[in-house]
Amino acid sequence: MSHQRVVLWIMVLMAGTGLLDAGHADAAAQLHLVVGVAVSYLGFLWYRGDSDARGFRRSRWLSVAVVALTVATIPYYLVRSRDEAERGRALVAYAACLAAAAFAVWVGMAIHIGLT
């Protein structure tokens, strides 16, 4: 799966979560674990694809950390896998992805509110 497709699926999951949260908060709370596992899996897919493309040797502990603490570990990986010229740009792109995920949740909520 390509990097762009993984990010797109994460955004779709976030929008779906927002849609469910706005309409059925009690039922959606039970799905947060499933969504969290799916996002961790997709984050690992991105990490695996990126590290393979860059020839970065993945350690077992970093792989576990990427699955367990995706949001916190990806910046560490970005700093370790990029040279100095690329680090800042990679971290800004990651921050933009996090902002886009939060926006996708908001869009999902707005869609539900607009439909009711």
Image (cartoon, rainbow, N blue to C red):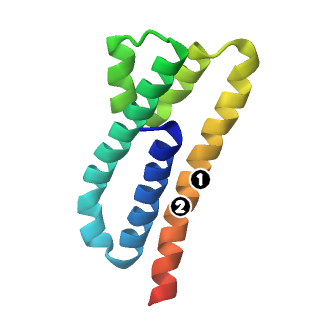
Badge 1 crowding class, 10 Å Cα cut-off, few under 14, some 14 to 19, many 20 or more, is some
Residue at (53% x, 76% y) in the render:
110
Residue at left 33%, top 31%?
68
Q: Position of residue 23 (x, y in %)?
A: 37, 78
In the picture, the quarter occupied by the C terminus is: bottom left
Screen quadrant of the N terminus: top left
**Of 28 and 104, the residue lying toward us:** 104
* Disc sitting over residue 116 in the figure: none
Q: Using the image, tell me which numbered label, if any, was put on residue 100.
A: 1
Q: Is residue 80 above or below residue 3?
A: above
Furthest-bottom residue in this view: 116
C-alpha distance separating marks 2 and 1: 6 Å
Up/down of 9 relative to 113, above or below = above
Give the residue drawn at x 32%, y 22%. Answer: 64
Q: Are marks 2 and 1 in contact (CB under 8 Å)?
A: yes
Q: In the figure, 33 relative to 16: above or below?
A: above
Q: Residue furthest right?
A: 85
Kind of residue indicated by mark 2: Ala
Q: Quadrant of residue 13?
A: bottom left
Residue 81 rendering spot, x and y as whole percentages: 57, 15
- The one of 23 and 3 positioned closer to us in this rendering: 3
Give, as a three-letter code, the residue at label 1.
Ala
Q: Of helix, strand and loop, which one carries label 2?
A: helix
Q: What's the mark number on residue 104?
A: 2
Name the residue located 57 percent from the left edge and 46 percent from the top edge.
Answer: 98
Crowdedness near tag 2: few (<14), some (14–19) or many (≥20) residues, C-alpha within 10 Å: many
Q: SS at mark 1?
A: helix
- Report x, y in % for residue 72: 48, 31
Total number of numbered discs in the rendering: 2
List x then y, in percent, for residue 9: 43, 51
